[in-house]
Amino acid sequence: METLNAIDKKLLYKVAGLHEIPQGAYNIRKNGQSAGRNTTANIDIVTKEDRPGINVIIRPGTKNESVHIPVILSQEMNDLVYNTFEVGENADVVIVAGCGVHNPGSRRAEHDGVHEFFVRRGARMKYVEKHYGEGDGSGERVLNPTTIIEIEEGGTAELEMSQIRGIDSAKRDTRVRLHRGAKLIVSERLLTYQEQFAESNITVELLEEASTAQIISRSVAQDKSRQIFHLNMRGYAECRGHIQCDSIIMHDAQVSSIPEITAFHSDAQLIHEAAIGKIASEQLVKLMCLGLTEKEAEETILQGFLA
């Protein structure tokens, strides 16, 4: 395994909660190359032969196991990776991804990841993806993740996707297809500031009866940053879906929230909600009466909103 320096370890902690090399299955990618890998009896990780990336194969019936696949960039470069995940029937696993970028230079540091998941019949997958950027250089820190998920009958996918801070430009594209009795839960959290830009496009297709989907997106836009959300849900059978998109806008920021629902069946029940607003003054006053400064009160409210 390649030696990780202090910057690498900080990035790993920020995006994957790792103080050290994890137990179980993992694949750590650093600056476009493998920095370490481990497999288990139930989880195999194989390098793709036709393009950069890995295949993660989780055996049917696997329970109480996790796989970590973080990416770290600590130099100026454009890194592109294609990862495929096979979650076997009746498995129940946690997949921890995420990308941390430390850019000390004047040129762009970019990671584009295409993740494709097959959640087989009766399987359950929790997928956690965090983005974080830092560095004193003037070069941009750019992330463009694409997530494609197929959930078979009775399967469940729970997605926790967050952009912590420090990413100058990000475009997230998420596409999910649900079959009979499949379930999707998405929790998205996003913070932008200065002149950062973030775009999130989520398309969910409820293809068969008894499929359900819930998407909750919360964001904070500060300074002159810009955010665009396009959440698209389509119901093709007797199904239930709910979209909720809430944003706090501050200073000279811009937020555009475009929830869209389309029913192709009379028994499709789809709901969308979208709200954009500022911090309520009474919340600030209450916390300041408890001894917090205005800045501390504001930060407390924002942390609670994005929690």
Image (tube, grey):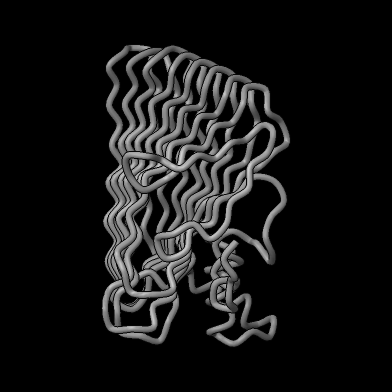
In this rendering, the answer to whether 35 lies above or below 291 is: above
The residue that appears at 62% across and 22% down in the rendered structure is 60
* Residue 6 placement (x, y as % from top left): 59, 78
Is 239 in front, or is 121?
121
Is 130 in front, or is 282?
130
The total number of labels drawn is: 0
* Residue 58 placement (x, y as % from top left): 59, 31
Specify whether 165 is left or right of 9.
Answer: left
In this rendering, the answer to whether 103 lies above or below 110 is: below
Specify whether 301 is left or right of 237.
Answer: right
* Residue 230 placement (x, y as % from top left): 28, 46
The residue that appears at 38% across and 26% down in the rendered structure is 177
* Residue 10 placement (x, y as % from top left): 58, 73
Specify whether 25 is left or right of 8.
Answer: right
Q: Quadrant of residue 261?
A: top left
Q: Quadrant of residue 163?
A: bottom left
Give the position of the C terminus as an image quadrant.
bottom right
The residue that appears at 36% across and 31% down in the rendered structure is 204
The residue that appears at 44% across and 12% down in the rendered structure is 209
Q: Quadrant of residue 175?
A: top left
Give the position of the N terminus as an image quadrant.
bottom right
Is 150 in front, or is 69?
69
In this rendering, the answer to whether 111 lies above or below 148 is: below
Is 87 in front, or is 129?
87
In this rendering, the answer to whether 287 lies above or below 17 is: below
